[in-house]
Image (tube, grey):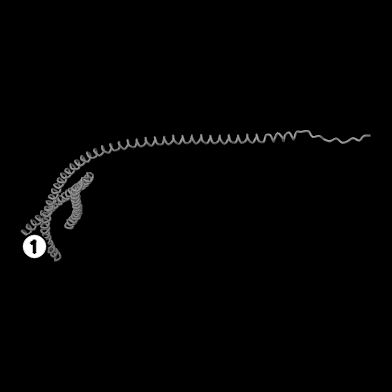
Amino acid sequence: MGRFFVIGLFLMFAITLCSQTQQIDNLQKQQKILLEEIKNTNKLFLDVKKQTTTILQRINLINKQIAARKEMMTLKDQEITALEREQSHLESEIKRLNEELKQKQDSYAKAVRVMQASRSRQNELFFVLSGRSLGESLRRMQYLRDYSKWRKNQAEEIKQQNVELTAKKDELAKTQTDKQNALNALKAEQVKLQEEENARQSEMAEARGKQQELQKTLQNKQLQARKLDAQIEKLIAEEVARQEREAEARRLVAEAERKRKAEEVAARARRETEAKRKIEEPARKESDNTETAPVKIAEPAVKQP
């Protein structure tokens, strides 16, 4: 029963350790991918730096490097945390195995002492034959066989547990080495990150200088453009005013001409009317006289008586 319990604990620990190992493998794979990305980005950065002096492109590439570096540092932290958990598990497992090994060794030593003391008083044959019945003698014989088998199993388990304990200690040592390597790598990444941060600050300072220079030039150009716009607007306003004055003058001239023509037409009409009146006046007077002259009516002749 105890053996199955030990096997169960070992399997449970193996499953946990397998899960942690898988997690570490995944983190290392991601780290490898990130290293390749950093390598490619760095190569691209060097190529771009040689081929162009565009400051914004360099800053963008540095920002990508810094982001990848920070992500790698995060993965390193996670890897170290996983290694620390694995180390803690291994230390707990080694402690448990040591305790179990000590218990088994104590039990085995006690059993050996009991058997040796028993053999000093009577031998195994006498122990079997001293049974009160044949059945009891057979049971004693089976007991001696089981006891001998148990001793062999205990000895084998102690041997296997020693092997397992040694393996766990080796694994713990490897984990500690991996952890130290990860810490060293993390420190190296921090140094590289600081270098890249300094490079970015330098690039940004250069960019700010260029930006201020460009901004000053742009402001001068904008000022010139505003002056030019003001001049253009002034000229347009003057032209519009001139055209409006000309249009008003043309309108006044046209209005005066229209009035003059209207007055001429009216005067001509008055003259024609007056001339017609003068022509028609005598005839009308004659017609009026004719119409107003008295008419003499002949009186009838009166016969003389």
State which quadrant residue 225 falls in: top left
In the image, taking residue 292 as reference, residue 208 lies left or right, namely left
Percent x, y of residue 227: 32, 35
Label 1 CA crowd tier, 10 Å (few <14, some 14–19, many 20+): some
Give x and y (percent) for residue 241: 41, 34
Q: Residue furthest left?
A: 120
Which sits in the foreground, 73 or 215?
215
Quarter assignment of residue 236:
top left
In the depicted view, which residue is nearer to us: 202 or 226? 226
> What secondary structure is marked by label 1?
helix
Residue farthest along the right direction in this orientation: 305
Q: Nearer the viewer, residue 282 or 238?
A: 282
Q: Decide: is 27 above or below 198.
A: below
Res 70 seen here: no
Q: Amino acid at mark 1?
A: Glu
Please provide percent x and percent y for residue 216.
26, 37
Relative horizontal placement of residue 73, taking residue 159 as reference (left or right): right
Name the residue at 30% across, 36% down.
224
Residue 217 seen in the figure: yes
Count the numbered circles shown: 1
Which quadrant is the C terminus positioned in? top right
| 37 shown above or below 276 | below
Q: Residue furthest bottom?
A: 134
Give the quarter of the figure containing the N terminus: bottom left
The correct choice, above or below, for 39 with respect to 246 in the image is below
Above/below status of 108 relative to 189: below
Per the image, the residue denoted by label 1 is: 124
